[in-house]
């Protein structure tokens, strides 16, 4: 096996952890590739075996009021079960009162009762306005969330087969409830995930080929990204052996792995090609690329992991698992960028220029040439402009007129963010994804018949005491037009329950309003001091929404604080982290403004779908609005991704500032030498998340639109206009750091970039000292010149 020369080993040793890791991976490339091949193969084998173990998106929250109520009902009425589902019967020819129809219903009910996990089976009285061809039976299903999901397919099969056989095919039935509705999404998610990858991967490859100038170079990031997706998916499938993993987690991890895998590999590849253009051998170029761009990639991954970890404070299991999925995908992506990519680069070096693309004038596109041009000129720099293309002309223009562009950019962002003031958050059944499923059609029938859900009040009382008097509350609820029926039942020991049949869907505003009214009426209409707990889909969704809204502000605070600390350590400046946070908040606000506007115009579906199955809104069905979990997930993810571009751009500005001591020249240099790279990386990320718009899930579509819009806004309005303008105007104040913080912050370590004889003079990333003291700046910088 070929080894690197001693000089390269010294370089790697002096270049810090990433340089040593990259050099080692390059020297032992065959071993590294074999390890990754084993991981990929194991993941490919595990994936089809474990797809059946994927769980439904959980709505459970530890110790939530709805969960406590469900547990109390399960103990007091074991046969009522931990979830009440509905058998929704339908016949195109028979009336519900026909003897043959009734026989089919009875046969199905008896077959269901004989199955494990089913408790009480109760016929539901006909309500006003109900279709005469529809009949409903309530069933109590026992077991926890995963147990109910595991038993559901067999339960559905028994119900479908018995109803069909007992009626000669004239009666059909759907099993409707929170578990069946969420379970249907699993099948749609797996199909959507495959389609998203089929659409986004070729598009990303074309973008990379255009930006890098050759198909051969574009394949390298693709290999890293695909490997990341496969291994990340395999890790999640392995997790499913010991805990619940749902398709939402799988989809998010795949999107993050694809986007970051392409981005991180692109940044390191560009540094590799730059080093090769300066005469470095493939092994030396690999060591240099991982020592420089690899360090920036490591910081970027740390930011993404940190912002995702902030979601762990939310008590909802679903949110925590999504955060964990994003963290796992980011960690595996970083490992691939620092090990698999360095192993591949020297061996694929002859192929990087294959399939060269010609541009106007016949010259191939070579993005890697960025960073090797001459000095950037600007007004007052004392040097002639080097006008090598559009980016140079734009940079010079922006440096001459920062104020108009700063004001214009701020105006655009604030106008884009204005619609967010009217955002409507909620949790809705994804009727678009359910439109053509048996469960979705049963749900739609229930909503049209105004018997859409059941809420159960648990009223505990002392053992041996008489049942709780619910007469006044039942009468009030009976008179409410939102209520179809209300019936009380006591277990003869210590618990009374009041079942309330709701006419509106549990995810509708009307059901939420009814739940609030019950909370308000119960203390007045029940005996004094009576304890009340409420279970059911409406209560579970309300608890999850409340936790998400409350946790949003906590997540925002943690993300902002963590971002400030990380950037303070990296750049050793106070204003740069504050500026970065403000810019990211503007980008996120503008993206949410776009999402709010699109959701209101399209009824909640960015891709333009309707809100109810079949495109017909049922009575009391929630219309538009934004999934309450989207702000949580998108804010954390977008903040982490945006910081990648912040580090990349500001680092270049900072290193030139400390070499020249001229802020304006440094800003122009940084923008000119990073604009095309940032644009290409962001375009790949936009394509990745925009692919979620092709799915059938409204929450996936909303997530994809939000992240894609935020990155597009970030890379155009913010990184290319707002940040350079602001840094141009702030001047030397960009690098201000109080003397006390200079002593408190960890001392930076030189990474040894000077060990490369062809490198530009190594300079610190930032320094709180005046330019006149740049001879001492090496003690205050955090990264070296080429990192990023």
Image (tube, grey):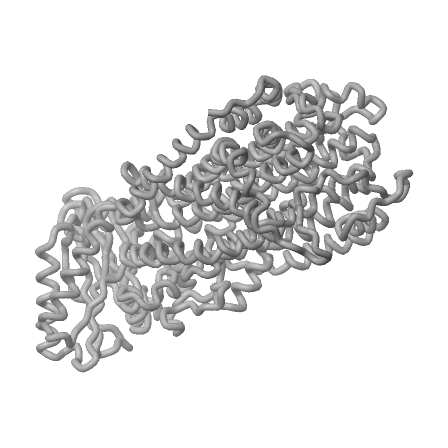
Instruction: Name the residue at 68% across, 37% down.
Output: 578
- Residue 86, how many percent across, how many down? 22, 62
Horizontal side of 602 relative to 457 (left or right) equals: right
Eyeballing the image, is 670 above or below 592?
above
Horizontal side of 561 relative to 490 (left or right) equals: right
Name the residue nearer the viewer: 95 or 378: 378
- Residue 448, how many percent across, how many down? 32, 73
Query: Is residue 532 in view from this perspective?
Result: no
Query: Is residue 410 in view from this perspective?
Result: yes
- Residue 256, how many percent across, how many down? 48, 45
Query: Which corner quadrant of the image does residue 173 belong to?
Result: bottom left
Instruction: Name the residue at 47% across, 64% down.
Output: 605
Instruction: Name the residue at 35% across, 51% down.
Output: 540
Query: Which corner quadrant of the image does residue 134 belong to?
Result: bottom left
Name the residue nearer the viewer: 278 or 670: 278
Horizontal side of 152 relative to 178 (left or right) equals: left
Eyeballing the image, is 98 above or below 58?
below
**Location of the C terminus (image quadrant):** top right
Name the residue nearer the viewer: 208 or 784: 208
- Residue 267, how many percent across, how many down? 60, 39
Name the residue nearer the viewer: 587 or 617: 587
- How many badges with numbers are in the image? 0
């Amino acid at each position: 096996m070929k080894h690197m020369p001693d000089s390269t080993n010294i370089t790697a040793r002096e270049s810090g952890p990433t340089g040593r890791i990259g050099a080692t991976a390059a020297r032992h490339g065959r071993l590294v590739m074999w390890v990754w091949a084993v991981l990929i193969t194991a993941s490919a084998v595990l994936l089809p075996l474990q797809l059946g173990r994927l769980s439904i998106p959980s709505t459970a929250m530890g110790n939530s009021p709805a969960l406590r109520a469900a547990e109390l009902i399960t103990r007091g009425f074991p046969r009522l079960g931990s979830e009440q589902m509905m058998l929704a019967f339908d016949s195109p020819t028979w009336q519900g009162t026909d003897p043959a129809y009734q026989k089919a219903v009875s046969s199905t009910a008896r077959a269901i009762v004989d199955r494990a996990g089913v408790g009480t089976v109760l016929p539901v009285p006909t309500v006003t306005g109900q279709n005469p061809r529809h009949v409903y039976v309530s069933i109590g299903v026992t077991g926890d969330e995963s147990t109910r999901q595991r038993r559901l397919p067999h339960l559905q099969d028994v119900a479908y087969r018995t109803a069909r056989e007992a009626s000669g095919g004239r009666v059909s039935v759907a099993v409707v409830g929170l578990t069946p509705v969420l379970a249907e999404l699993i099948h749609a998610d797996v199909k959507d995930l495959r389609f998203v990858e089929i659409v986004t991967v070729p598009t990303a490859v074309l973008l990379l080929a255009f930006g890098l100038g050759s198909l051969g170079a574009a394949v390298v990031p693709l290999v890293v990204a695909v490997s990341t997706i496969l291994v990340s998916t395999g890790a999640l499938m392995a997790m499913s052996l010991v805990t619940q993993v749902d398709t939402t987690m799988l989809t998010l991890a795949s999107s993050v792995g694809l986007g970051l895998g392409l981005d991180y590999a692109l940044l390191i590849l560009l540094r590799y090609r730059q080093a090769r253009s300066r005469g470095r051998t493939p092994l030396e170029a690999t060591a240099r690329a991982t020592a420089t761009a690899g360090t920036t990639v490591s910081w970027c991954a740390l930011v993404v992991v940190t912002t995702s970890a902030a979601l762990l404070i939310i008590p909802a299991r679903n949110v925590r698992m999504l955060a964990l999925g994003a963290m796992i995908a980011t960690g595996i992506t970083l490992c691939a960028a620092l090990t698999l990519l360095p192993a591949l680069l020297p061996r694929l070096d002859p192929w990087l220029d294959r399939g060269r693309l010609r541009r106007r004038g016949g010259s191939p596109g070579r993005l890697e040439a960025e960073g090797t041009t001459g000095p950037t000129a600007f007004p007052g720099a004392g040097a002639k402009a080097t006008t090598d293309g559009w980016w140079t002309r734009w940079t010079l223009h922006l440096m001459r007129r920062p104020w108009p562009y700063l004001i214009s950019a701020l105006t655009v962002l604030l106008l884009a963010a204005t619609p967010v003031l009217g955002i409507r958050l909620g949790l809705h059944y994804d009727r678009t994804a359910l439109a053509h499923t048996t469960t979705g059609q049963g749900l739609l029938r229930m909503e049209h018949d105004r018997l859409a859900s059941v809420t159960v009040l648990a009223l505990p009382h002392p053992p041996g005491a008489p049942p709780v008097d619910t007469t006044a509350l039942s009468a009030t609820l009976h008179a409410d037009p939102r209520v179809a029926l209300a019936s009380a039942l006591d277990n003869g020991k210590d618990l009374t329950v009041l079942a309330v049949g709701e006419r509106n869907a549990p995810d509708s505003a009307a059901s939420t309003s009814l739940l609030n009214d019950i909370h308000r009426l119960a203390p007045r209409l029940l005996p004094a001091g009576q304890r009340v707990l409420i279970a059911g889909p409406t209560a579970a969704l309300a608890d999850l929404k409340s936790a998400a809204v409350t946790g949003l502000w906590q997540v925002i605070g943690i993300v902002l604080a963590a971002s400030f600390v990380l950037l303070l350590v990296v750049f050793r400046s106070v204003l740069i982290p504050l500026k970065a946070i403000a810019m990211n908040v503007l980008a996120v606000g503008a993206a949410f403004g776009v999402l709010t506007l699109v959701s209101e115009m399209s009824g909640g579906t960015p891709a333009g779908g309707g809100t109810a199955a079949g495109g017909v809104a049922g009575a009391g069905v929630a219309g538009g609005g934004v999934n309450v979990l989207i702000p949580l997930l998108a804010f954390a993810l977008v903040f982490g991704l945006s910081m990648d571009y912040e580090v990349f751009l500001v680092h270049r500005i900072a290193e030139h500032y400390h070499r020249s001591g001229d802020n304006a020249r440094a800003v122009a240099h940084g923008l000119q030498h990073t604009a095309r790279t940032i644009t290409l990386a962001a375009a790949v990320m936009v394509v990745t998340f925009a692919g979620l718009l092709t799915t059938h899930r409204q929450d996936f579509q909303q997530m994809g639109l939000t992240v894609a819009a935020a990155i597009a806004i970030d890379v155009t309005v913010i990184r290319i206009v707002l940040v350079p303008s602001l840094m141009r105007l702030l001047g030397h104040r960009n690098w201000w750091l109080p003397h006390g913080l200079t002593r408190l912050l960890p001392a930076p370590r030189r990474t040894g970039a000077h060990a490369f004889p062809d490198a530009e003079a190594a300079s610190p990333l930032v320094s709180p000292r005046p330019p006149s003291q740049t001879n001492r700046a090496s003690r205050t910088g955090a990264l070296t010149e080429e990192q990023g």
